Image: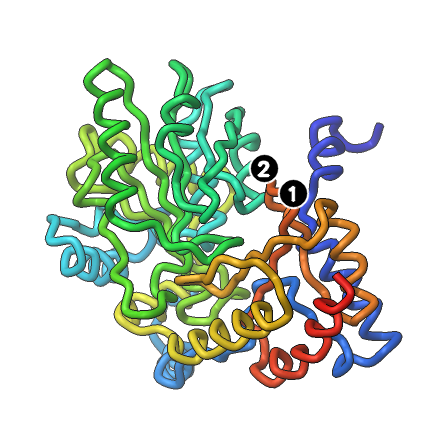
């Protein structure tokens, strides 16, 4: 075999998201792009804030020497200081630049953290449904993913998590606001989770929380995002600016390591080393200089909330059973038939493209990404209603 057996196996389980997106591209060529309702990919049509674009022009037009050279593997010192100050304001903890490592998006950040933490066959708990790439990231570094079902409303099932913990458990990855469900974990359930992990700590087992917060600024209805750093000292968060600043193609984010974490310097040094040896070397120089000063900014969240309300109402009117998203830009309705793949295929007859729940470890559901044009969502209404009549 030309390629590795491991990669060959992983490719068989590769992303349904991309598979359905590619299928959509074929249908667009046949029927025309305006006649296909593509909800497959979380690729925002929203443009970055105007102030950010203006700052980008200023940066790339600068005559400052050394702008495109290597820097510390952790990133520019002044940028990390800006982000540390932002984290300090949000958490009231003593973050410094040393607690921040600039990364190639949140995907790069999660891989760096897992590389720094995992020994072969260490287990990482992941609530299900889940973002499928987590499995590949964990296995990249010799770990074993243990899926744990969430409750009916997709919130954390602490009892299930407790049962899943073994003496090999090294970390739990949580993702809130959540992809694919749009659920935002509340402070109560996070306190229950951290209480469970603190009990394990008393028994001599240290379990890290790796919090994927790529959508943390995209939250609706006045919900307050809970501060994990204040709840649990062994917390590492990974932030991406792909969604909040609409920069997915620029691949920029950062790791924040809790100042309360015991032996934090050891983990900080390990993540910086992992950033280098995984081949990222450092996060993109221009993007680092850009995002540091935009930590308090985001795209128009009110616009996303309008889209959330519209797609939710359309689905409810069409008779679908669905949990209303509180954040991110995904919605995860229940399939009217048990075979979600078959149902997603049937949606294509109505020119609606979605992703089956099996792609997120949860059969019997399907995901829509509503980070699309408002007009497309509105035009999809009659097609969903037609589906609802036949389901």
- Location of the N terminus (image quadrant): top right
Q: Position of residue 4 (x, y in %)?
A: 74, 29
Secondary structure of the residue carrying tag 1 is loop
Q: Position of residue 236 (x, y in %)?
A: 31, 41
Q: How is the image coloured?
A: rainbow
Hey, which quadrant is residue 199 in on the image? top left
Instruction: Using residue 29 as the reference point, say whether residue 61 is left or right of it.
Output: left
Q: Position of residue 5 (x, y in %)?
A: 75, 26
Q: Which residue is mark 1?
A: 363
Question: Residue at the spot x=27%, y=57% of the render?
Answer: 225
Q: Nearer the viewer, residue 50 or 378?
A: 378
Q: Earlier in the sequence, mark 2 or mark 1?
A: 2
Q: Nearer the viewer, residue 142 or 43?
A: 43
In the image, residue 260 sits, relative to residue 203, either above or below, namely below
Q: Position of residue 251 (x, y in %)?
A: 49, 60
Instruction: Using residue 299 as the reference point, say whether residue 206 is left or right of it.
Output: left
Q: Is residue 69 visible?
A: no
Question: Residue at the spot x=74%, y=54% of the render?
Answer: 19
Hey, which quadrant is residue 56 in on the image? bottom left
Question: Residue at the spot x=29%, y=50% of the render?
Answer: 186
Secondary structure of the residue carrying tag 2 is helix
Q: Which mark is residue 378?
A: none
Determine the CA span between mark 2 and mark 1. Answer: 19 Å
Hey, which quadrant is residue 346 in on the image? bottom right
Q: Which residue is mark 2?
A: 136
In the image, residue 334 sits, relative to residue 67, either above or below, namely above
Instruction: Using residue 82 as the reference point, say whether residue 119 is left or right of it.
Output: right
């Amino acid at each position: 075999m030309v390629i590795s057996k491991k990669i060959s196996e992983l490719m068989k389980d590769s992303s349904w998201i991309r598979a359905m997106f590619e299928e959509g591209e074929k249908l667009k060529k046949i029927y025309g792009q305006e006649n296909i309702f593509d909800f497959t990919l979380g690729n925002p049509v929203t443009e970055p804030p105007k102030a950010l674009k203006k700052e980008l022009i200023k940066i790339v037009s600068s005559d400052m020497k050394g702008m495109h050279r290597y820097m510390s593997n952790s990133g520019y010192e002044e940028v990390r200081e800006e982000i540390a100050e932002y984290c300090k304001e949000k958490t009231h903890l003593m973050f410094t630049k040393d607690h921040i490592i600039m990364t190639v998006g949140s995907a790069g950040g999660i891989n760096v953290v897992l590389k720094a933490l995992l020994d072969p066959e260490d287990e990482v708990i992941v609530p299900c449904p889940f973002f499928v790439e987590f499995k590949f990231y964990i296995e990249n570094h010799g770990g074993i993913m243990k899926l744990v079902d969430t409750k009916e409303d997709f919130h954390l099932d602490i009892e299930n998590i407790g049962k899943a913990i073994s003496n090999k458990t090294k970390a739990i990855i949580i993702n809130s606001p959540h992809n694919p469900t749009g659920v935002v974990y509340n402070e109560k359930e996070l306190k229950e989770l951290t209480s469970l992990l603190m009990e394990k700590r008393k028994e001599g087992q240290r379990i890290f929380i790796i919090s994927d917060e790529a959508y943390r600024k995209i939250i609706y209805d006045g919900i307050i995002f809970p501060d994990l750093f204040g709840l649990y000292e062994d917390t590492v968060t990974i932030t991406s600016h792909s969604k909040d600043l609409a920069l997915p193609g620029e691949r920029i984010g950062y790791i924040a390591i809790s100042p309360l974490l015991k032996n934090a310097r050891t983990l900080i040094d390990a993540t910086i080393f992992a950033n280098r040896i995984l081949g990222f070397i450092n996060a993109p120089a221009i993007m680092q200089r850009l995002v540091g000063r935009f930590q308090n900014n985001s795209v128009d969240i009110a616009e996303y909330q309008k889209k959330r309300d519209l797609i939710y109402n359309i689905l409810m009117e069409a008779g679908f059973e669905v949990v209303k998203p509180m954040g991110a830009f995904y919605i995860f309705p229940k399939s009217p038939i048990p075979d979600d793949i078959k149902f997603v295929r049937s949606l294509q007859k109505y020119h609606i493209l979605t992703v089956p729940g099996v792609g997120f470890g949860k059969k019997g559901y399907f995901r829509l990404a509503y980070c699309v044009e408002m007009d497309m969502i509105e035009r999809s209404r009659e097609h969903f209603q037609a589906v609802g009549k036949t389901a």
